[in-house]
Structure formats: C-alpha cells, structure tokens
Amino acid sequence: MAKAKYKEYFQKMKDENQELFEKFAAIHEQYKLNKQVNQAKFNDIGKQVVELIREWERRLCTVMGKGQYSQYAQKLSEKFWNLARKEFDQIDMVGVKIEMVEPES
C-alpha cells in the first residue's frame, strides 16, 4: 500500500535536513528535562525547524488549497503538523519564554 503523501513529504523533509533534525532532537530531549536551562538553544534551533516545517507544509498544501480541495488542505496541514508533534511533543513551545519565579519569603 502506498504511503500517504503527507508522510512522504515529512520523511523527505527530515531526510534532506537530517543534521538540523538531529540537533533539534538532542536539544528537545534536554529541554524536556530542564526547560529554563535549555530554553535559549531550544528556541534558536526550534525556530529553524518550525520555519522548515511551515515551508514543507506550504509545498504540500499549495496545490490542494485551491478550489474544491481547500478543506482537504486544512486537514492535510493538521496531519502534517501532528507528525511533527508526535516526534517532538514540545515543538509548540518553540518561542515561548519561561521565567523563573522566585519564591516569596
């Protein structure tokens, strides 16, 4: 059975940008362990990854976004992002700043 187009695009994106995704996977794991310490590097590398995912999402959905397939393109976009979220469950945290709160004495 043929692989779904969005899955093919996602895998191709990862294959063509393997070094970036490996860096992000490493900092992603560190970020999950200690958000405050790893926040700057996570946001820096994560920003590149999010931009790349958006670029590939546009490639995937551009043709489908016109005419009668516009609703399909929206669902396709969601499926594409869900693949990213499945692999990197903290990806929605890219760009979020976490401040350390001092306990009141």
Image (cartoon, rainbow, N blue to C red):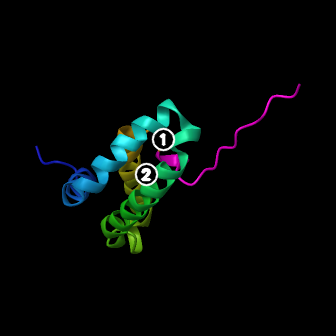
**Residue 18, above or below 28:** below
Q: Amino acid at mark 1?
A: Gln
Q: Exactly how many numbered labels are in the figure?
A: 2
Nearest to viewer (mark 1 / mark 2): 1
Residue 21 is left or right of residue 3, and the answer is: right
- Between 36 and 49, the one nearer to me in the picture: 36
Task: Write the residue at 54% across / 46% down.
Answer: 39
Q: Residue 6: x and y, percent?
A: 28, 54
Task: Write the residue at 25% across / 50% down.
Answer: 7
Dot 2: within a 10 Å radius of its alpha carbon, few (fewer than 14), some, or many (20 or more) residues?
some
Residue 82 is left or right of residue 59, and the answer is: right
Question: Which secondary structure lies at badge 1?
Answer: loop
Q: Can residue 56 be seen from the camera position used here?
A: yes
Q: Residue 1: x and y, percent?
A: 10, 43
Q: Is residue 92 magenta?
A: yes
**Residue 18, above or below 33:** below
The residue tagged 2 is 78
Q: Amino acid at mark 2?
A: Glu
Q: Which mark is residue 90?
A: 1
Residue furthest to the front: 105
- Between 44 and 91, the one nearer to me in the picture: 44
Q: Which residues are magenta?
A: 91-105
Q: Measure the C-alpha gap from mark 1 to mark 2.
A: 16 Å
Task: Write the residue at 47% across / 49% down.
Answer: 42
Residue 100 is left or right of residue 102, and the answer is: left
Question: Which secondary structure lies at badge 2?
Answer: helix
- Between 84 and 101, the one nearer to me in the picture: 101
| Marks 1 and 2 in Cβ contact (< 8 Å) | no
Q: Mark 1 or mark 2, which has the lower sequence index? A: 2
Dot 1: within a 10 Å radius of its alpha carbon, few (fewer than 14), some, or many (20 or more) residues?
some
Q: Can residue 5 be seen from the camera position used here?
A: no
